[in-house]
Amino acid sequence: MAPQIDTSSYWTDNTPAPKFSALKEDIAVDVLVVGAGITGVTAAYLLKRAGLSVALVERHRCVEGETAYTTAHLSVVTDTRLKDLVKKFGRDHAQAVWDAGYAAIEMIDRLVWNEQIKCQFQWVPGYLFDPATETEERAALELKEEAELATELGFDAEFVKCCPVFHRPGIRFENQAKFHPRKYLLALLRLIPGKGSYVFESTNVEEIHGSPITAMTDKGHRIHCGHVLVATHVPLQGKSSVIPATLLQSKLAPYTSYALGGWVQRGTVPEALFWDTRDAYDYLRVDRRHDHDYVIFGGEDHKTGQVEHTTDCFARLQQRLKKLLPEISITHRWSGQVIETNDGLPFIGETSEGQFVATGFSGNGMTFGTLSAMMFVDYVTGVANPWKDLFDPGRTKVLGGAWDYLKENADYPYYMVRDRFVSVGGKSVRAIARGTGEVIEVEGQPAAVYRGLDSKISVRSAVCTHMGCYVHWNDAERTWDCPCHGSRFKTNGDVMAGPAEAPLAPIEKKKSKVVG
């Protein structure tokens, strides 16, 4: 007899959540967050850490909405191809979209580290491939062009003739990631209540009005606040009038996506993320376990409510998965909903005074959800955010016009560490000309490498000892300069000018493996 397949999400297994009471009285806080998924929980945590009082309100149970039904890919690669983003929004704006994804992943990585969250977070490569055999030559050419464009914009992408598992031409993107979303969010959730901040479940916000803002629950209790984040997947009308709210809704389209999870023999599939180029596309991720690997395979997306026999979607998905991995033992199947927008970018921003919405994350719910929380915290605290106009619900400024994107946002925290997530050139030491320097990879680490006029090589870490940014080569002065705060180093790594006080560190060599 075939094993029974669990129809709940894989993430809900063995991850009990704390229970919170419903709101039973009127309260006042600095900020109200409506919806306890990836966006709401992250925002509430960051707001409390910033010293603000916050009420996180969920009409059902926390972390049991659409966030619980994700496949939890953490990727900068958007559903809309990079070339199409460039065509529609321009090169700087397209780069900004992918940078936003990296900023979100870097935030998740930082919170995992700061709070020591055991959620299997891991940096892995991602592969985009074309599954069609009849158009392989044309597809390979298009993928090469996409990889070259990504590289030009500073991202670490490489065309490969044969992707692992699927054995098709594709693109390998470095520095993507994956994690267990529920373990991650439950850890953050437990840190929110206390010292004037609250989490409420079984509490439905029905009205939001006024300035300062008053939110009314279905039980008649009031929450008074200065700002509100509507993080409910499909946004409530809130303070917006009927016409703007309806207009926003008209730009959104809900799609249902299906997922299967199962065990395979350890090492069958490399740990990575995979997507194909079809519309709708299949996607796959692999998690290494002690004795087996767990594979999650998704696809069969369609507009919600427009397919009568949804069990057929699971059947087709299972057929493709079994063809790919015949020995897989499927344990779970579930479906979730993604929200697409009319132009391929999410809507994140203010919709009326003090009210902020976040929706339309398409296939990047974990990254854009985290980004939305970051943008909302900047909004509340008055920090200029690089992506404010790009994702604004009423955006008009991003079409056309020139924008010195990197220069204008050099002081934003993400851009102090941006170089950690982009290509460092891919050159070898031998390719560096005399009297010049390059930042390349040495021993798996970013290295500031200088070749003297006498051909002698100096190799130091490219990480500035002040705040961890990557130094750049100054060809005119023959120095290593930090673009974040202006530290300068000699070709051998010694400090020329602060604020850095310590020289660039030596590159640590990996231990050689003993053979035989």
Image: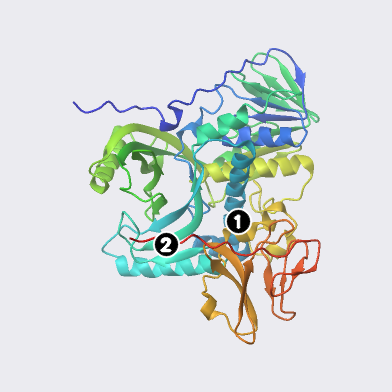
**293 or 95: which is nearer to us?**
293
Q: Closer to the camera, 147 or 267? A: 267
Circle 1 Cα neighbour tier, 10 Å, few/some/many (<14 / 14–19 / ≥20): many
| Residue under the point 57% across and 21% down | 18
- Identify the residue position indicated by label 2 in the image: 171
Residue 238 picture location, percent across and down: 67, 31
Among the 4 quarters of the image, the one containing residue 230:
top right
Q: Where's residue 246, x and y in %?
A: 60, 37
Q: Residue 37: in sight, yes or no?
A: no
Look at mark 1 in the image and give the residue it sits on: 99
**Quadrant of the rendering where the C terminus is positioned:** bottom left
What element does badge 2 sit on?
Answer: strand
Q: Coloring scheme of the render?
A: rainbow
Task: Identify which residue is drawn at 78% across, 31% down.
Answer: 226
Q: Is residue 209 visible?
A: yes
Q: Which quadrant of the figure has residue 30? A: top right
Q: Is residue 120 left or right of residue 49?
A: left
Q: Residue at x 66, y 36 (%)?
A: 43
The image shows residue 120 at horizontal and vertical percentages of 49, 40
Quadrant the N terminus occupies? top left
Along the line of sight, the residue nearer the viewer: 143 or 510: 510
Q: Is residue 300 left or right of residue 347?
A: left
Q: Amino acid at mark 1?
A: Asp
The amino acid type of the residue labelled 2 equals Ile
Q: Secondary structure at mark 1?
A: helix
Percent from the top left, x then y, of residue 236?
61, 31
